Image: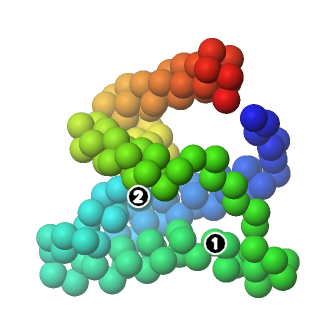
């Protein structure tokens, strides 16, 4: 398994995510955590609060269409697991997000920018778990 090294695309993506999170906080006082936005769109807790959430979610998933418009072809996507594994993984992530009071984007980008101790600890936990998982999958299991 090889991971593509894309420093310029990654930098640009990080700048755009950072800009969007700062803009949402500055303009509406909201934290741009993807799971909280999705949850609020599905379970509209405040009247009139769904529109911006749905627009942001549509923007998140429309990226391949932007690539198609810019390049004339869709980006290559390889998913090396079964649909069942994706569903189970999604459920596990959902449980983790609930237990962790937020997702990696909310804690890692927005929470750490606010110097939230809870978010700093959560992000460190995510990173350590990621390093261990990648090591085990690549070097122990041999994926």
Write down the residue under mark 1. Answer: 63
Is residue 131 visible in the rendered image? The answer is no
Query: Image point 75% across, 67% down: which residue?
Result: 75
Looking at the image, do the residues carrying marks 2 and 1 touch, with CB atoms under 8 Å apart?
no
- For residue 34, the mark is 2
Q: Left of 82 or right of it: where is 66?
A: right
Residue that lies at the very extreme toward the top in this rendered image: 140
* First of labels 2, 1 by sequence position: 2
Q: Left of 113 or right of it: where is 78?
A: right
Residue 98 pos. (x, y %):
24, 44
* 45, 80: nearer the viewer: 80
- For residue 84, the mark is none
Query: Image point 24% across, 37% down: which residue?
Result: 99
Residue 6 pos. (x, y %):
81, 47
Residue 21 pos. (x, y %):
48, 59
* 79, 41: nearer the viewer: 79
Q: CA distance from mark 2 to mark 1?
A: 15 Å
* 4, 12: nearer the viewer: 4
Q: Residues within 10 Å of mark 1 (few under 14, many from 20)?
A: few
Query: Image point 33% across, 65% down: which residue?
Result: 38
Q: Left of 90 or right of it: where is 128?
A: right
Report the number of discs: 2
Q: Residues within 10 Å of mark 2 (few under 14, many from 20)?
A: some
């Amino acid at each position: 398994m090889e991971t593509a090294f894309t420093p310029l695309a990654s930098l640009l993506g990080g700048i755009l995510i950072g800009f969007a999170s700062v803009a949402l906080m500055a303009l509406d006082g909201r934290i741009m955590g993807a799971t909280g936005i999705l949850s609020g769109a599905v379970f509209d807790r405040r009247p009139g609060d769904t529109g911006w959430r749905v627009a942001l979610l549509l923007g998140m998933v429309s990226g391949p269409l932007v690539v198609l418009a810019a390049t004339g072809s869709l980006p290559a996507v390889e998913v090396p697991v079964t649909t069942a594994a994706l569903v189970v993984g999604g459920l596990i992530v959902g449980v983790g997000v609930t237990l962790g009071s937020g997702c990696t984007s909310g804690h890692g980008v927005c929470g750490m920018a606010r110097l939230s101790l809870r978010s700093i600890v959560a992000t460190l936990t995510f990173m350590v778990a990621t390093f261990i998982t990648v090591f085990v999958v690549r070097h122990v299991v041999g994926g």
